[in-house]
Image (cartoon, rainbow, N blue to C red):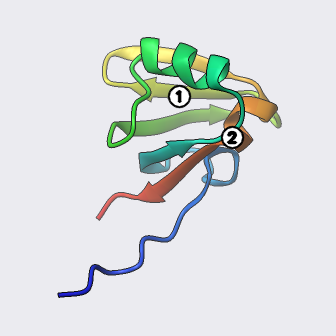
Amino acid sequence: MMQPVQRTLPLAMAGTGARVRLVEVTGNQRSARRLAELGMIPGSHLTIMNDHGGTLLIAVGDTRLALGAGVAHSVLVSALD
């Protein structure tokens, strides 16, 4: 049975209030490792609390994180069903 195609987009493009699932962190391994230490692993649910035109404030569980535009563009997410 074929799996449905999962549409992904950069976290930076999701918009304030979006609830998404982390699919993949692209870019360098150091950034990916640091984000994983902060709870941002594939499959985790994220909520964009605020988009300050480059810096995103996101929620990962009970944790709040501020991500710069470069990092936010390297995080690929999909919409929660």
Residue 54 visible in this rendered orientation of the protein: yes
- Relative to 3, residue 12 above or below: above
Residue 49 location, x and y as percent?
53, 32
Residue 62 location, x and y as percent?
32, 16
Which label belongs to residue 58? 1
Q: Which of the two discs, 2 and 1, labels the residue nearer the N terminus?
A: 1
Q: What element carries label 1?
A: strand
Residue 15 location, x and y as percent?
62, 50
Three-letter amino acid code at disc 2?
Ser
x 40%, y 31%: residue: 41
Image side of residue 77 versus residue 75, left or right? left
Residue 74 placement: quadrant: top right
Which label belongs to residue 74? 2
Three-letter amino acid code at disc 1?
Ile
Residue 52 visible in this rendered orientation of the protein: no
x 41%, y 78%: residue: 5
Image side of residue 22 versus residue 53, left or right? left
Q: Which of marks 2 and 1 is in front?
A: 2
x 82%, y 37%: residue: 53
Image quarter of the N terminus = bottom left
Residue 61 placement: quadrant: top left
